[in-house]
Amino acid sequence: MSADLSHYLGVFRRHWWVVLAAASAGLGFGALITQAMPKVYESSTSVLVQAVSGDTNASGGRTKGQINLDTEAQLVGSGAVAVKAAALLRSPVSPIELAHDVSVEVPANTTVLVIRFSADTPKGAQAGSHAFAEAYLRNREETARAGLDQQIKTLTLKAKQLTTSLSNINNRLARAADGSFERSNLESLRNNSQNQLNNITGRLNELTTATVGAGSIISDAREPDAPISPNAMLNMATGAMAGLLIGLGLAFARERFDRRLRSAGDVRDRGRIPVLAALDERTTPRFDDVLQPYGPGGRVFNRLRNEVLASLNSGDQIIVVTGASRGSATTLVAANLAAALARTGSDVVLIGAHLPDSVVDAAPLARMLGVAPMPGLSDLLAGRIGLHKAMQRTPRIPSLRVITTGGTATAAGLMQSQRLRDTLDALRRQTGYVVIEAPSTSSSADAQSLASLADAAILAVELRRAKRPALLDAAEQLSRVGTPLLGAVVLPRLNAMRADEQNLPAVTLPAERRPEPRSDERAEPRPDETAVLDAERTQAMRRPAGPTPGGPVRSRPSELDEVTAIIDLGSAGTQTKTAEKTGEQPDQK
């Protein structure tokens, strides 16, 4: 559950601007809808409904009492009431359309009808509500009056019939003999008819004197202050919510189709590669830094070292570090892993076989570890120097030696040479561990070639630069050559160099002092001057301003072989001395 929640929060954190933009668009759309919709005003009138003769309630009805208020609510919107309301309003609108704008509410446990009317103006809403209330009461009163009139008419007719009947009975009684059976029957009929006539007369008196009270208005309509529609808050909240849902959908769609790796979870879940270590922005330095052993990043690499040593089989010594994308992640991981291994006291050799991607990154290993950029691996594989001369011991970590990339700009084809195999075999016998900084699998086939000669491999994954297809392809390349992939080291996108360091070489050499050749003698070129350089990958060295140290330039005898750069770390800055010796290489320090 926590992993799923963190994944969703990570998606939102990476695509928050999409969600925010969609929510803002929904909010704006709700505001536009509010402005475009016509305003609707509503006014209400409360009517107290009184019982009249003839009122009945349905058995089991919702409302209690003699009056069925649900029926009365339906009568408010009836055609008869709408016709009377239209007459009161003197409106050209048809009664049917007016009835559509009226609504009735029955409060619980009351005999009150709340009649509401909607219109496009406040005065129209007030007038409509009052008109329908008046029309309903008049219609109810007329209906009740008509019922009374009908009862009076019926009783009057009955009374006339009884009066005529009594007259006939009285005439017959006058002709009947006293004490006869006929007379007694006629007297009985006369008494019954007289009683009926008396009852009818009394009922007529009640009906003719009755007052019809259909109900009354207890709260008349008022002119509304604000429209009930459109509801700006509701429309804007609905728009923002719809935009938020759409934004979340777009964010997850972008996440689903985004091939870039954005978190360690992406490497583990989408790349199906175990994560050995993950560094964040707090622990990851710039690309040319070696982490302090007791700092946050150094502790991460110490744990990585322990996991790597635990994963290696007996006799495994060579570890290749490659990347899933171009960049300096491979250099950073290889250098810090080699430093962590060397801090245990093991003799470690770090081989730089990764050609920098740009001139800004020239000689990154040399800059990180404080060694000279030349000679290096390319010079060794080309046969210009031996293995002992190619290895340089780092000043800060004595048990770590480095073979830099070298002086030539490319070593294409040399990574498959027998000389490289012989070199690695020699290093297996002479050292404890060998860490190879290989190019990325997406930029060169050399990574696969180097991995075939190694015992284990580690992938350096730079987030927001590496892509899932490239990661899967890197794992596939390593599996094809049979090299066990221990896992991945995940780093955030690395920062570039500072602007004031971009043009500085790793080691600054002073100007050479060369003697002038004699007129009858042609100066022989030095071996290191005949190296073929790639102008696109070579960084121009910036010489110090001012006069050249050591006085004016003088010629150098042609029999001298080479100049070796010796780094002196004792002074405040890096200084270079020139050791010259005839016929043999000077000892490297």
Image: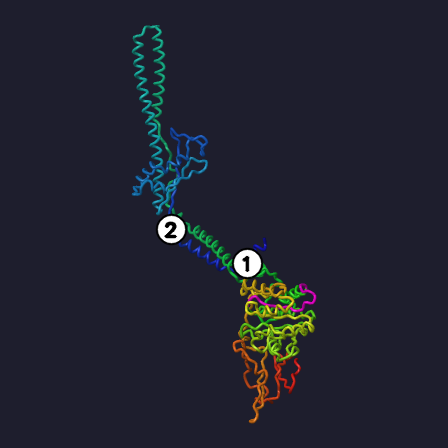
Q: To which quarter of the image does residue 150 belong?
A: top left
Q: Which residues are magenta?
A: 310-325
In the picture, the quarter occupied by the C terminus is bottom right
Q: Which mark is residue 10?
A: 1
What amino acid does circle 1 point to? Answer: Gly
Asked whether, in this view, residue 80 is left or right of residue 406, the answer is: left
SS of the residue at dot 2? loop
Measure how far apart labels 2 and 1 are at the Cα level: 39 Å
Near mark 2 (Cα within 10 A), the count class, few <14, some 14-19 or many ≥20, is: few
Q: To which quarter of the image does residue 565 belong?
A: bottom right
What amino acid does circle 2 point to? Answer: Met
Residue 280 seen in this snapshot: no
Residue 66 seen in this snapshot: yes
Q: What residue is shown at x 53% (from left), y 58% (from top)?
A: 11
Is-magenta flag for residue 261?
Answer: no
Near mark 1 (Cα within 10 A), the count class, few <14, some 14-19 or many ≥20, is: some
**First of labels 2, 1 by sequence position:** 1
Q: Which residue is mark 2?
A: 37
Query: Of circles 2 and 1, which is in front?
Result: 1
In depth, the one of 67 and 475 nearer the eye is 475
Disc 2 and disc 1 in contact, CB within 8 angstroms: no
